[in-house]
Image: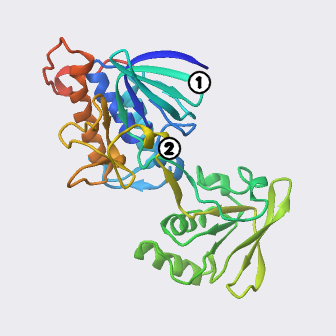
Amino acid sequence: MSGLIETDIAIVGAGPTGLFAVFEAGMLKMRCVVIDTLPAVGGQCAALYPEKPIYDIPGHPRIDAQALVDQLVEQAAPFAPHYLLDQQVMALGAQDGGWRLTTSGGQQVQARAVIVAAGAGAFGPNRPPLDGIEAFEGSSVHYMVGKREAYRGKRVVIAGGGDSAVDWAISLAEVAAHVAVVHRRPKFRAAPESTDRLDRMAREGLIELVVPYQLAGLEGANGQLSGVRVATLDGVEKVVPADVLLPFFGLAMTLGPIADWGLDLERGHIRVEPATLATNTPGIFAVGDIASYPGKLKLILSGFSEAAMACHAIHPLVHPDTALHFEYSTSRGVPAA
C-alpha cells in the first residue's frame, strides 16, 4: 500500500518505548504513525526473547517480554495508532512545517514531529559463514526463538557462548528431544548462575556440550537439516544429528538511513537534550536505547520516562494555540478502545 498519511507524530521504532510513546501522545490528544523494520511490533523483546522474563518493570516482579509487549499494545489501542510494519524509513525531509517520511514500502507520512525510538537501530543476525545455509533458513535454521513448543521432540543444536545460547539451551532442554551446544571454547560468556546450571545439566546428561568445536557445515535436503558438521581448531570433524540449528552469534546493528538525517551522532547513538529528548534538529526527538545524554541508563523504564517527556515537549508543536495543563491519568481517565 502506498500513499500519504497525515499524522501528528511519526514514531520510528515499535519496541516498548515506541509503543508507550503512542499512549503518552494519545493522552495529549496527538495521533501517531509507528514505523518498524520488523514484521511485528515489540522490537527486540518480541523478536529475540519473547518468553524470557523481565524483572525491572515497575509493578511487575516478573513479566515475559511478549506479555509486556502485548500489554503495551493494549494500552496504546484506545488511541488507534497506524502501524507500518516490515518497512524502513528510507528518506526524511522537512516539508509543510513538519516532516515527510518515505518508507521502503512506498508509504509517505507527513508529521509535525518525529520520535526516533529505534533501539540500537535496525538489526539482523550475524550469520555463520556456512555454504548453503540460506536453503535452511526459516525452516530448520533460525536466529531467534518464538515459541518453545515449536521445538518439542526435536533435536536442537545451539551454536554460541553468550547469554542467548546458554539461556535457550537450558529452556529448550525441557521440551526438545536432545539439545547440543556448540562452542569453540569450554568457557561460556553467560551469567555465572546460568553457566553453572548449564554445566550441571550437562553432567546430568540433559544437555550435550560440544566443545571446543565450531560450525563447519550443514547436512540435509529440501530445507530440512539432518545434521550439523562441527570441527575442532585442528580440523577434526564430526556430525551432530539435528533437526534444528539455532546460531546465536549476536546481532549486526546499523542505524541505516537514520545516519544520514543530519543528527548529532555519538558512537551510533543520537545526542539529545535530557529534559526534552530533542535532537539538534528541531522537530526530531530520540528516546530509548538510541538516545544519548550524560547519566543515561539503558533501561526500559528510562525509555518510558523519556517517551513521556518527549511527547510533552512535542505538544506545543502540534497544538501551538493550546496551553498544556498537566493532568494525571487517574484524574483524566483513558478513552475506551
166 or 255, nearer to the observer: 255
What is the residue that sits farthest to the top in this orientation?
321
* Left or right: where 181 falls relative to 78: right
What is the residue that sits farthest to the bottom in this orientation?
234
| Secondary structure type for disc 2 | helix
264 or 319, nearer to the observer: 264
x, y percentage for residue 149?
63, 53
* Left or right: where 121 falls relative to 59: right
Residue under the point 73% across and 56% down: 140
30 or 180, nearer to the observer: 30
| Number of other residues with Cα within 10 Å of mark 1, as a class: few under 14, some 14 to 19, many 20 or more | some
Q: For residue 174, what is the image quadrant?
A: bottom right
* Left or right: where 74 falls relative to 161: left
Earlier residue among tags 2 and 1? 1
Type of colouring: rainbow
Where's the C terminus, which quadrant?
top left
Q: For residue 241, what is the image quadrant?
A: bottom right
x, y percentage for residue 175?
63, 61
Mark 1, residue position: 106
Q: Is residue 49 visible?
A: no
| Secondary structure type for disc 1 | loop
Mark 2, residue position: 256
x, y percentage for residue 268?
39, 52
| Number of other residues with Cα within 10 Å of mark 2, as a class: few under 14, some 14 to 19, many 20 or more | few
x, y percentage for residue 49?
50, 53
Where's the N terminus, which quadrant?
top right
Residue under the point 59% across and 19% down: 2
